[in-house]
Amino acid sequence: MQSRRSRILFATVLASTMGAATFALTCYAVLAADLISEFGVDRWQIGALVTAMSLAGAVMSPRVGR
């Protein structure tokens, strides 16, 4: 019984994490024009931010996934 509960909890946490990561990148894409006009940043800076987030996730995932 405990094993089944652990698997359900793991699947829930995994799905939530994947959804949150995808949602963050989509938010930057949708809000890019507003971020540029509000904060006066360039398009390449928004792209660099999203790229840095993706690279940080790629670098950290093997360590955190263990």
Image (spheres, rainbow, N blue to C red):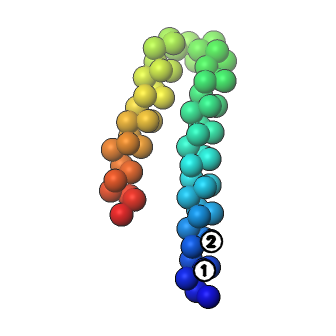
Q: Is residue 38 visible?
A: no
> What kind of element bears circle 2?
helix
Q: Count every numbered label the image shows and give the total.
A: 2
Numbered label attached to residue 63: none
Q: Is residue 6 visible?
A: yes
Q: Position of residue 44 (x, y in %)?
A: 46, 14
Q: Which residue is more in the foreground, 38 or 55?
A: 55
Q: Is residue 12 above or below residue 62?
A: below
Residue at image coords 61%, 55%: 15
Numbered label attached to residue 4: 1
Residue at image coords 57%, 53%: 17
- Badge 2: few (under 14), some or many (20 or more) residues near its Cα, within 10 Å? few
- Badge 1: few (under 14), some or many (20 or more) residues near its Cα, within 10 Å? few
**Viewed as shown, does residue 49 lie left or right of 28?**
left
Residue at the farthest bottom position: 1
Residue at image coords 36%, 49%: 60
> What kind of element bears circle 1?
helix
Q: Which residue is more in the foreground, 5 or 40?
A: 5
Image quarter for residue 29?
top right
Q: Position of residue 31 (x, y in %)?
A: 66, 23
Residue at image coords 34%, 53%: 62
Residue type at mark 1 is: Arg
Residue type at mark 2 is: Ile
**Viewed as shown, does residue 3 lie left or right of 37?**
left
Query: Is the C-beta separation of discs 2 and 1 under 8 Å?
Result: yes
Image quarter for residue 66?
bottom left
Mark 2 lies on residue:
8
Q: Quadrant of the N terminus?
A: bottom right
- How far apart are the alpha carbons under marks 2 and 1? 6 Å
Q: Is residue 32 above or below residue 15?
A: above
**Viewed as shown, does residue 54 lie left or right of 9?**
left
